[in-house]
Image (tube, helix red, strand yellow):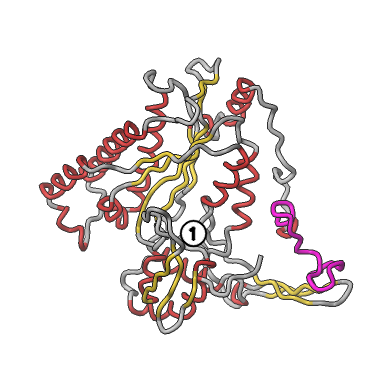
Amino acid sequence: MARPALEVADVFRRYGDAYRQQHHTSLSTAQRRVMTAIETCRTAVLGGHVEQCDACGHQRIAYNSCANRHCPKCQSLARAAWLEHRRAEILDCEYYHVVFTVPDEIAAIASQNKPQVYKILFQTTAETLRTIAADPKHLRAEIAFFAVHHTWGQTLVSHPHLHCVVPGGGLSPDGTRWVACRPGFFLPVRVLSRLFRRLFLQALQTAYDADTLRLNGPLEALRDRLAWTRTLAVLRQTEWVVYAKRPFAGPQQVVDYVGRYTHRVAISNDRLLDIDDGHVRFAYKDYRADPPQAPKTMTLVAGEFIRRFLLHVLPAGFHRVRYYGFLGARHRREKLARCRQLLGSPASIMTSTDTTVPMDYRDRVEALTGMSLRVCPACHHGQMIVIERLVPARVVVLIPDTS
């Protein structure tokens, strides 16, 4: 795949220092680390190695990656490895994509309280799906799903929401039957929306009563209990968006689709169009347009682009992909086996990449993507051999990927 002409790293390298100087008091340590990681990714700063073809003598320099989960260049291998494991868990049934979104007022509170609000979002989404699915009036089954946390819209504004991928059925309460949902219909979204709204606002009120929420700047008025109560009263009357997309066409489509939604950052490099004259231009899709239109172009002052990107830096240690029901880690293997037995499906066969033996990164890339980093790109038959190690120019503290 050809390297994009422009990268988020180029924006940070060109305008990052000025942004740091202007906002040095408001930038968090995590945001500073993300900026530094992206700026130095695959540069001499992080070190690397020199390779040479054993046939034609062609040389190339390979610099180390930052491995930061917010970096647009460092997600491909992690995504491929994650998908390889998910393929082993796909069941032979319909799959549904359900999205839970919070109103803008909640997004504003989340911007100052990411750990608390994001935790509430995961907990109440999971409780909503499992409660309605277990209800005898609906499915009366134990379902399973994984949820992927996103915080952005196409224009990089704050838009917290969860993408849930759910098999179209579940285990009966006694575990003896597979209970399938109606073809083409999972659960009523209006019922899901009402329960999600109630559970979320209850949890948010509990956090407020415990005085664990930061309410500064434009949110300072909410410190007054009367103002807070009025805001929640309005939110209780607001329609919260929960929607289910059309069922996937089959297991392979599930894998292909979730591959686009997991290990994703706020904006991909290939959407950048121009970064000159102190501005950043990028393409975006207007999903509210009806009918859908061709990609549009947005131009932001470089500082505003950086600010919007940094809105989506996650709290340290935060897991943005989580598993529920019989996909939970404790009973996943045996319950998936039971589901396949009830569905009359063959047992899952893990691929060769499912191993605890450490692999060279070049072997991992080839096993997961089919691309060889060992074959010489010049003569196409020689092997690239490491002939020199390049030490890092300086020590940089990196944030591990905890997705």
| Residue that extends furthest to the right in the rendered view of this protein | 55
Residue 202, quarter of the rendered image? top left
Residue 259: in magenta span: no
Residue 352 relative to residue 146: left or right: right
The residue shown at (39%, 48%) is: 161
The residue shown at (50%, 37%) is: 247
Q: Which x, y percent locates residue 209? A: 20, 43
Q: Nearer the viewer, residue 215 or 158?
A: 158
Q: Is residue 78 above or below residue 132?
A: below
Mark 1 belongs to which amino acid?
A: Val
Residue indicated by mark 1: 265
Residue 163, quarter of the rendered image? top left
Residue 244 relative to residue 72: left or right: left
Q: Is residue 340 above or below residue 120?
A: above
Q: Which x, y percent locates residue 322? A: 48, 42
Q: Which x, y percent locates residue 380? A: 83, 68
Q: Is residue 132 above or below residue 45?
A: above
Residue 117 relative to residue 316: left or right: left
Q: Which residue range is magenta in the image? A: 365-386
| Residue that extends furthest to the bottom in the rendered view of this protein | 277
